[in-house]
Amino acid sequence: MSGGNSPLRSLGSERDNNKCRRFHLALQTIPLVRLFFSGAVLYLLIIGVLINHVFLLPSLSNIRMSTLQKNGSRIDNTQRQHLLAVADNEEGASACLLVNDENPRLPEWIAYHYHTLPLRALTVAIDPASRSSPLEILQRWNDTGLIEMQLWNDDDFLYRHSANGSKKETIRVSADVYGHRTRQNHFINKCMADFKRRNKQWVLLIDVDEYITFNRIDENNQEPAFPTEKAPDGIPTLMDWTWYKGGSEEGWLDGWINNMSSPTYITTESLVSRTQLQPGGVVTDWAGNSYYIQDDRALRDLEALDEPPEEMPILTYTMVDSEDNICGEIVNDIYEDRWDEEWVCIEVDWEAPKDDQKKKNIFHGGHVVEDLQHRKYFLEKEQTFWPKGLSIKKAKEARERLPKVGERKTILDVVKEETNRHGYETIGSCITMPRLRYGPFEDQSEATTVMASKEINYKNFVTLRYRWHAAKGIYSYGKVMIDVSQIPSEKLLVEADNVHAPLCHYCHRPVWFYSPHYVKSLFRVNHYLDSFEAYTYRKDIRVELRQSIDRYHSLGKEGNHSMDIEGSPWLQEFVQEMGIENAKMLLAGAGSFPKLDVNLWNIPWG
């Protein structure tokens, strides 16, 4: 990467150089006679305005790593020096964002995380489908010197080094969901590698409609029950269980009851509430039967092996595919002599009467599995470097210690305090956080809203406007914050595994049917659905989902379970810290969704 030490990358000039040529070609294609006899003069004027608007926008496809100088801070120098002095005394965090038409959301996202994380370095990559550039928003912050900003495009991360390391090979991605995920995964790891090179520590990996917060125990809001180490008296234990969503909102379980004279296979009726679906908790079905669901993965971890017990192939980066085969990269294939690191899939009998291998939901590293020919394979123990995590008791105590609303502590303050209290190996280098969906329903009482200023409308900010959310503990897949200082550089040279657990050897493997240990998490990520206008604003490759009113209403209904009683004072504190004029400058455009698509947008420009 070139461009010296400037924190923000400038825009390339290639598109500007082609601007006049393309406009000239457009003129050549229109006969002059029609200009005067069919109203085409007006038509051309409109096109000219559009061309001027479009081509003077930053060139999204030609962002380069060259230097963009600071334009000089728009904040009063005395106040700026005070803010910089405060920032220098704080241990700041970094973040990576891949954006697509996110300018209405960015001002709030940056300001919120500057104040609460505290965010001190941000790298933003622009999806090629984006019709707008975040440059002006990033430039405001870059000029203050309070956040180190970088702006990337595909050329800055969609590459791999050739075998001899002499040159970069461009990675081509398809224009579909698979291509979107490939772009996302390469960006995540390249971004983390860059922050590691710059001696940063904690890096937040969430989206621009997501906000990290403390996962306080809310006595005014229904919380999932804390799991227990064993079943309550009179409640049978369900082991080797699997969750099936089916056509029911709650779904059902099957598994084995192990506290009878002999293990018995059972299938439950539909569950009364999916919020109960936490390992170590009790679920009740509509027939009135209750079951304690054993934490199968935790028990299997206690017996996991570091190495295979005898010579056999090893499967790494393992997963279960759609046909219930175990897939992964094979090493030491003594059966079919396949190349090391070749991707293979093996068929296994999940119903085999072996304690090791009954259900795919307890599939985990550090164990031996057999294929249908009874050949043995060892699943790499990927969880070796996973955080040990807090016990139930200590997690509850830690959540009770979390700062109250209005108490001025940052996310990193708590990370540092709990790491000092419990040890780094307990908190770990990858903090997995559950998510909580917030719906589009608004609380009509402004008396319960923390107002920042009469000059700033709180309804422009999703973190203040929307207070109704889904049931806690049911949102599948979490997001992470990673300490890149503890990750070997070579682990960041390849594509990330996925956005929810980018590094499978450092982050807990996600489980699709329940939120990752909601009750044990000190932090969570609030995910805001926002208005339908905002939901459909992005030119997303998943257009059939992003433009569906039915899907929007379905997600909105899910987010109408409970309401936060206490509002967040972050904006009020941000305004007090920055001053009203500076805050208005940094927050300009928040919550405003200008129309980007026009009828003439698809005109060929030559």
Image (cartoon, grey):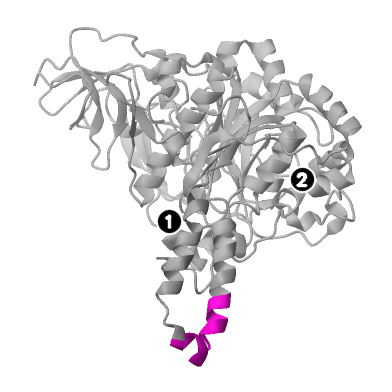
- Residue type, label 1: Arg
Question: Can you identify the residue that label 2 sits on?
Answer: 586
- Residue type, label 2: Leu
Magenta range is 33-45
Which circle's residue, 1 or 2, is located before the other in the chain? 1
In front of the other: 385 or 563: 385
Per the picture, the main secondary structure of the magenta-coloured stretch is: helix
Q: Is residue 227 left or right of residue 585?
A: left
Q: Position of residue 104 (x, y in %)?
A: 65, 54
Q: Secondary structure at mark 1?
A: loop
Question: Can you identify the residue that label 1 sits on?
Answer: 542
Q: Position of residue 539 (x, y in %)?
A: 49, 58
Picture residue at 49% right of the left edge, 73% below the top: 600
* Residue 445: quarter of image: bottom right
In front of the other: 294 or 550: 550
Q: Is residue 108 left or right of residue 179?
A: right
Q: Position of residue 9 (x, y in %)?
A: 58, 36
Q: Determine crowd level at label 2: few under 14, some 14-19, many 20+ residues with C-alpha closer than 10 A.
A: many
| One can see residue 210 in this view | yes
Q: CA distance from mark 1 to mark 2?
A: 31 Å
Picture residue at 25% right of the left edge, 24% below the top: 329
Q: From the image, which quarter does the C terminus lie in?
A: bottom left
Q: Is residue 12 left or right of residue 308?
A: right
